[in-house]
Amino acid sequence: MSRALDLLVTGLRHVARPRLLTVKEPQVARAEFERMARLAFRSSPYLCHIQDRAGLDRIQCGRCAPGKIVLFIHGGGYIAGSPKSYAPMLGRLSLLSGLEICAPDYPLAPEHPAPAAFDAAVAAWEHLIASGYAPADVVLGGDSAGGGAALALLSHLCRKGTPPAALFAMSPWCDLTLSGDSLTRNADRDPFLPAARIRELVGYVLPPGMEAADPRISPLFATFPDCPPVLLHYGETEILFDDCRRMAARLRASGAAVSEDVHPTAPHVWHLFDGWIPEARRSLCDIAYFARMSL
Protein backbone atom coordinates (compact mmCIF):
# COMPACT_ATOMS: atom_id res chain seq x y z
CA MET A 1 0.00 0.00 0.00
CA SER A 2 1.37 3.40 -0.95
CA ARG A 3 1.78 6.14 1.63
CA ALA A 4 -0.83 8.15 -0.26
CA LEU A 5 -3.36 5.32 -0.01
CA ASP A 6 -2.62 4.92 3.69
CA LEU A 7 -3.37 8.62 4.21
CA LEU A 8 -6.55 8.40 2.14
CA VAL A 9 -7.85 5.42 4.12
CA THR A 10 -7.11 7.24 7.38
CA GLY A 11 -8.87 10.36 6.18
CA LEU A 12 -11.94 8.46 5.01
CA ARG A 13 -12.13 6.54 8.28
CA HIS A 14 -11.91 9.64 10.48
CA VAL A 15 -13.75 12.21 8.35
CA ALA A 16 -15.93 10.79 5.56
CA ARG A 17 -17.28 7.70 7.32
CA PRO A 18 -18.36 9.55 10.49
CA ARG A 19 -20.14 12.10 8.33
CA LEU A 20 -21.99 9.36 6.45
CA LEU A 21 -23.08 7.96 9.81
CA THR A 22 -24.60 11.26 10.93
CA VAL A 23 -26.01 12.96 7.80
CA LYS A 24 -29.78 12.88 8.16
CA GLU A 25 -31.35 13.55 4.76
CA PRO A 26 -30.56 11.99 1.37
CA GLN A 27 -30.73 15.44 -0.20
CA VAL A 28 -28.03 16.67 2.19
CA ALA A 29 -25.84 13.67 1.38
CA ARG A 30 -26.37 14.43 -2.32
CA ALA A 31 -25.24 18.05 -1.96
CA GLU A 32 -22.23 17.06 0.13
CA PHE A 33 -21.16 14.46 -2.45
CA GLU A 34 -21.18 17.10 -5.18
CA ARG A 35 -19.20 19.48 -2.99
CA MET A 36 -16.65 16.78 -2.14
CA ALA A 37 -16.31 15.92 -5.83
CA ARG A 38 -15.43 19.51 -6.70
CA LEU A 39 -12.73 19.55 -4.03
CA ALA A 40 -11.31 16.02 -4.16
CA PHE A 41 -11.66 14.65 -7.69
CA ARG A 42 -8.89 15.82 -10.03
CA SER A 43 -9.82 16.47 -13.64
CA SER A 44 -7.73 15.81 -16.73
CA PRO A 45 -6.60 18.72 -18.91
CA TYR A 46 -8.66 19.34 -22.07
CA LEU A 47 -11.68 17.44 -20.75
CA CYS A 48 -14.70 17.82 -23.05
CA HIS A 49 -18.07 17.39 -21.30
CA ILE A 50 -21.27 18.10 -23.22
CA GLN A 51 -24.88 16.92 -23.36
CA ASP A 52 -26.25 15.40 -26.54
CA ARG A 53 -29.72 15.95 -27.97
CA ALA A 54 -31.18 13.23 -25.75
CA GLY A 55 -29.78 14.90 -22.64
CA LEU A 56 -27.09 12.26 -22.11
CA ASP A 57 -23.72 13.46 -20.85
CA ARG A 58 -20.86 12.73 -23.26
CA ILE A 59 -17.32 12.89 -21.88
CA GLN A 60 -14.08 12.56 -23.76
CA CYS A 61 -10.46 13.55 -23.39
CA GLY A 62 -7.99 13.34 -26.22
CA ARG A 63 -8.53 11.51 -29.50
CA CYS A 64 -11.25 8.85 -29.30
CA ALA A 65 -11.93 5.85 -31.53
CA PRO A 66 -14.87 6.60 -33.86
CA GLY A 67 -17.96 4.44 -33.52
CA LYS A 68 -16.99 2.96 -30.15
CA ILE A 69 -18.26 4.04 -26.74
CA VAL A 70 -18.51 3.24 -23.02
CA LEU A 71 -21.94 3.51 -21.37
CA PHE A 72 -21.15 4.27 -17.72
CA ILE A 73 -23.69 4.32 -14.86
CA HIS A 74 -22.46 6.38 -11.91
CA GLY A 75 -22.67 5.35 -8.26
CA GLY A 76 -23.83 7.12 -5.13
CA GLY A 77 -26.19 4.62 -3.51
CA TYR A 78 -28.94 5.63 -5.97
CA ILE A 79 -29.40 8.83 -3.91
CA ALA A 80 -26.33 10.86 -4.94
CA GLY A 81 -23.77 11.36 -7.69
CA SER A 82 -24.01 12.72 -11.21
CA PRO A 83 -22.11 12.71 -14.50
CA LYS A 84 -20.73 16.11 -13.45
CA SER A 85 -19.21 14.78 -10.23
CA TYR A 86 -17.84 11.73 -12.05
CA ALA A 87 -16.46 13.67 -15.02
CA PRO A 88 -12.88 13.90 -13.66
CA MET A 89 -12.54 10.11 -13.34
CA LEU A 90 -14.40 9.45 -16.59
CA GLY A 91 -12.24 11.97 -18.42
CA ARG A 92 -9.13 10.12 -17.27
CA LEU A 93 -10.68 6.81 -18.34
CA SER A 94 -11.45 8.30 -21.75
CA LEU A 95 -7.88 9.54 -22.12
CA LEU A 96 -6.39 6.18 -21.10
CA SER A 97 -8.73 4.08 -23.25
CA GLY A 98 -9.17 6.32 -26.28
CA LEU A 99 -12.93 5.89 -25.92
CA GLU A 100 -15.81 8.33 -25.50
CA ILE A 101 -17.92 7.90 -22.35
CA CYS A 102 -21.71 8.27 -22.26
CA ALA A 103 -23.09 8.78 -18.73
CA PRO A 104 -26.85 9.12 -18.13
CA ASP A 105 -27.90 11.58 -15.43
CA TYR A 106 -30.53 9.23 -14.04
CA PRO A 107 -33.21 10.34 -11.53
CA LEU A 108 -32.27 9.73 -7.90
CA ALA A 109 -34.07 8.22 -4.92
CA PRO A 110 -35.99 8.81 -2.74
CA GLU A 111 -37.78 11.19 -5.10
CA HIS A 112 -37.40 8.61 -7.88
CA PRO A 113 -37.11 5.11 -6.37
CA ALA A 114 -36.29 1.90 -8.20
CA PRO A 115 -36.44 0.94 -10.97
CA ALA A 116 -35.76 4.54 -12.10
CA ALA A 117 -32.01 4.02 -12.49
CA PHE A 118 -32.49 0.77 -14.40
CA ASP A 119 -35.08 2.34 -16.70
CA ALA A 120 -32.74 5.26 -17.40
CA ALA A 121 -29.90 2.84 -18.20
CA VAL A 122 -32.13 0.96 -20.65
CA ALA A 123 -33.21 4.24 -22.26
CA ALA A 124 -29.57 5.34 -22.62
CA TRP A 125 -28.68 2.04 -24.28
CA GLU A 126 -31.62 2.32 -26.67
CA HIS A 127 -30.57 5.86 -27.55
CA LEU A 128 -27.06 4.70 -28.43
CA ILE A 129 -28.40 1.88 -30.59
CA ALA A 130 -30.82 4.26 -32.32
CA SER A 131 -27.86 6.61 -32.93
CA GLY A 132 -26.09 3.94 -34.97
CA TYR A 133 -23.99 2.02 -32.46
CA ALA A 134 -24.13 -1.77 -32.66
CA PRO A 135 -24.24 -3.71 -29.36
CA ALA A 136 -20.69 -4.91 -30.05
CA ASP A 137 -19.57 -1.23 -30.21
CA VAL A 138 -20.53 -0.57 -26.58
CA VAL A 139 -18.82 -1.49 -23.31
CA LEU A 140 -20.92 -1.15 -20.18
CA GLY A 141 -19.41 0.20 -16.97
CA GLY A 142 -20.38 1.44 -13.56
CA ASP A 143 -19.39 1.79 -9.95
CA SER A 144 -21.12 0.98 -6.66
CA ALA A 145 -24.89 1.32 -7.17
CA GLY A 146 -24.19 2.22 -10.79
CA GLY A 147 -22.19 -0.97 -11.12
CA GLY A 148 -25.25 -2.86 -9.96
CA ALA A 149 -27.42 -0.99 -12.46
CA ALA A 150 -24.93 -1.76 -15.24
CA LEU A 151 -25.03 -5.47 -14.33
CA ALA A 152 -28.83 -5.37 -14.28
CA LEU A 153 -28.75 -3.82 -17.76
CA LEU A 154 -26.29 -6.52 -18.85
CA SER A 155 -28.73 -9.23 -17.76
CA HIS A 156 -31.56 -7.49 -19.61
CA LEU A 157 -29.50 -7.30 -22.81
CA CYS A 158 -28.22 -10.88 -22.55
CA ARG A 159 -31.78 -12.15 -22.20
CA LYS A 160 -32.80 -10.12 -25.24
CA GLY A 161 -29.93 -11.58 -27.27
CA THR A 162 -28.23 -8.18 -27.74
CA PRO A 163 -25.30 -8.24 -25.31
CA PRO A 164 -22.67 -5.48 -25.28
CA ALA A 165 -19.02 -6.11 -26.02
CA ALA A 166 -18.09 -6.35 -22.33
CA LEU A 167 -18.72 -4.91 -18.88
CA PHE A 168 -16.53 -3.55 -16.09
CA ALA A 169 -17.68 -2.65 -12.60
CA MET A 170 -15.95 -0.99 -9.66
CA SER A 171 -17.16 -2.19 -6.23
CA PRO A 172 -20.67 -2.94 -7.51
CA TRP A 173 -23.66 -3.08 -5.15
CA CYS A 174 -25.40 -6.22 -6.37
CA ASP A 175 -27.66 -7.40 -3.54
CA LEU A 176 -30.26 -5.16 -1.89
CA THR A 177 -31.49 -8.12 0.16
CA LEU A 178 -28.33 -7.51 2.23
CA SER A 179 -27.50 -11.21 2.52
CA GLY A 180 -23.71 -10.87 2.20
CA ASP A 181 -21.65 -11.90 5.24
CA SER A 182 -19.18 -9.08 4.62
CA LEU A 183 -21.81 -6.55 5.74
CA THR A 184 -21.08 -7.72 9.28
CA ARG A 185 -17.61 -9.24 8.84
CA ASN A 186 -16.18 -6.03 7.36
CA ALA A 187 -18.36 -3.56 9.26
CA ASP A 188 -15.36 -2.30 11.23
CA ARG A 189 -12.78 -2.81 8.48
CA ASP A 190 -14.46 -0.74 5.77
CA PRO A 191 -12.95 2.76 6.05
CA PHE A 192 -15.69 4.47 4.07
CA LEU A 193 -19.15 2.86 3.94
CA PRO A 194 -21.07 2.54 7.22
CA ALA A 195 -22.85 -0.82 7.33
CA ALA A 196 -25.13 0.53 10.06
CA ARG A 197 -27.00 2.69 7.54
CA ILE A 198 -27.27 0.42 4.52
CA ARG A 199 -30.71 -0.92 5.47
CA GLU A 200 -31.93 2.67 5.73
CA LEU A 201 -30.51 3.31 2.27
CA VAL A 202 -32.42 0.34 0.86
CA GLY A 203 -35.57 1.88 2.32
CA TYR A 204 -35.00 5.03 0.28
CA VAL A 205 -34.40 3.08 -2.92
CA LEU A 206 -37.13 0.43 -2.89
CA PRO A 207 -40.75 1.51 -3.42
CA PRO A 208 -43.64 -0.34 -1.78
CA GLY A 209 -44.35 -3.59 -3.55
CA MET A 210 -40.92 -4.04 -5.12
CA GLU A 211 -38.91 -6.98 -3.81
CA ALA A 212 -35.28 -6.41 -2.83
CA ALA A 213 -34.35 -9.46 -4.91
CA ASP A 214 -35.81 -7.94 -8.09
CA PRO A 215 -33.05 -8.44 -10.71
CA ARG A 216 -33.49 -4.84 -11.90
CA ILE A 217 -32.04 -3.68 -8.59
CA SER A 218 -30.21 -6.81 -7.35
CA PRO A 219 -28.41 -8.36 -10.32
CA LEU A 220 -27.00 -11.07 -8.06
CA PHE A 221 -30.35 -12.78 -8.69
CA ALA A 222 -30.43 -12.14 -12.45
CA THR A 223 -29.59 -14.49 -15.30
CA PHE A 224 -26.89 -13.87 -17.90
CA PRO A 225 -27.22 -16.15 -20.94
CA ASP A 226 -24.37 -15.85 -23.46
CA CYS A 227 -22.67 -13.27 -21.27
CA PRO A 228 -19.69 -11.28 -22.64
CA PRO A 229 -16.44 -10.79 -20.68
CA VAL A 230 -16.67 -9.01 -17.33
CA LEU A 231 -14.03 -7.24 -15.23
CA LEU A 232 -14.70 -6.59 -11.53
CA HIS A 233 -12.61 -4.37 -9.23
CA TYR A 234 -13.25 -4.38 -5.47
CA GLY A 235 -11.51 -4.33 -2.11
CA GLU A 236 -11.09 -7.00 0.57
CA THR A 237 -12.10 -4.61 3.35
CA GLU A 238 -15.35 -3.43 1.74
CA ILE A 239 -18.73 -4.23 3.23
CA LEU A 240 -19.74 -5.05 -0.36
CA PHE A 241 -16.95 -7.63 -0.74
CA ASP A 242 -19.39 -10.55 -0.75
CA ASP A 243 -21.67 -8.80 -3.26
CA CYS A 244 -18.75 -8.69 -5.67
CA ARG A 245 -17.38 -12.15 -4.91
CA ARG A 246 -20.77 -13.82 -5.33
CA MET A 247 -21.50 -11.78 -8.46
CA ALA A 248 -18.32 -13.09 -10.04
CA ALA A 249 -19.32 -16.65 -9.20
CA ARG A 250 -22.81 -16.20 -10.66
CA LEU A 251 -21.43 -14.75 -13.88
CA ARG A 252 -18.96 -17.63 -14.22
CA ALA A 253 -21.81 -20.08 -13.68
CA SER A 254 -23.46 -18.45 -16.70
CA GLY A 255 -20.36 -19.15 -18.77
CA ALA A 256 -18.88 -15.64 -18.69
CA ALA A 257 -15.15 -15.00 -18.68
CA VAL A 258 -14.74 -13.01 -15.46
CA SER A 259 -11.58 -11.24 -14.33
CA GLU A 260 -11.28 -9.96 -10.75
CA ASP A 261 -8.89 -7.39 -9.30
CA VAL A 262 -9.24 -7.57 -5.52
CA HIS A 263 -7.21 -4.98 -3.62
CA PRO A 264 -6.24 -5.84 -0.04
CA THR A 265 -6.65 -2.35 1.47
CA ALA A 266 -8.13 0.12 -1.04
CA PRO A 267 -11.50 1.69 -0.13
CA HIS A 268 -14.80 1.57 -1.97
CA VAL A 269 -14.33 2.83 -5.57
CA TRP A 270 -10.76 4.05 -4.98
CA HIS A 271 -10.61 4.86 -8.70
CA LEU A 272 -12.30 8.19 -7.99
CA PHE A 273 -9.12 9.41 -6.29
CA ASP A 274 -7.02 9.38 -9.44
CA GLY A 275 -4.33 12.03 -9.11
CA TRP A 276 -4.05 11.45 -5.35
CA ILE A 277 -3.17 7.75 -5.06
CA PRO A 278 -1.14 5.68 -7.56
CA GLU A 279 -3.46 2.70 -7.03
CA ALA A 280 -6.28 4.62 -8.72
CA ARG A 281 -4.26 5.29 -11.87
CA ARG A 282 -3.08 1.69 -12.09
CA SER A 283 -6.64 0.42 -11.76
CA LEU A 284 -7.98 2.88 -14.34
CA CYS A 285 -5.22 1.76 -16.72
CA ASP A 286 -6.35 -1.85 -16.23
CA ILE A 287 -9.99 -0.96 -16.94
CA ALA A 288 -9.01 1.18 -19.94
CA TYR A 289 -7.02 -1.69 -21.45
CA PHE A 290 -9.88 -4.12 -20.86
CA ALA A 291 -12.41 -1.78 -22.49
CA ARG A 292 -10.20 -1.00 -25.47
CA MET A 293 -9.34 -4.66 -26.11
CA SER A 294 -13.02 -5.66 -25.88
CA LEU A 295 -14.03 -3.50 -28.84
Image (spheres, rainbow, N blue to C red):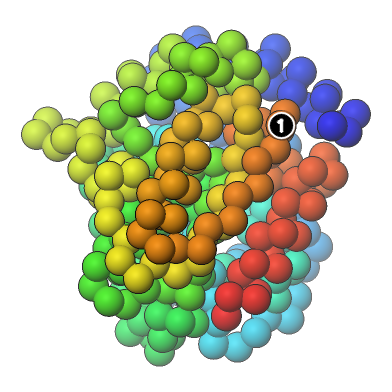
Q: Is residue 102 above or below residue 182?
A: below
Q: Residue at x 75, y 60 (%)?
A: 285
The answer to which image quadrant residue 208 occupies is: top left
Taking depth in this image into account, of 267 and 65 the one nearest to the observer is 267
Image location (x, y in percent) of residue 174: 39, 41
Q: Quadrant of the N terminus?
A: top right
Q: Residue at x 33, y 54 (%)?
A: 152
Image location (x, y in percent) of residue 107: 33, 48
Q: Quadrant of the C terminus?
A: bottom right
| Residue 211 visible | yes
The answer to which image quadrant residue 112 occupies is: top left
Q: Is residue 175 above or below residue 194?
A: below
Q: Which residue is mark 1?
A: 264
For residue 228, side relative to residue 109 (left or right): right
Inspect the image, locate mark 1, and give the three-letter code of the amino acid beneath it. Pro
Taking depth in this image into account, of 26 and 99 the one nearest to the observer is 99
Label 1's element? Answer: loop
| Residue 86 visible | no
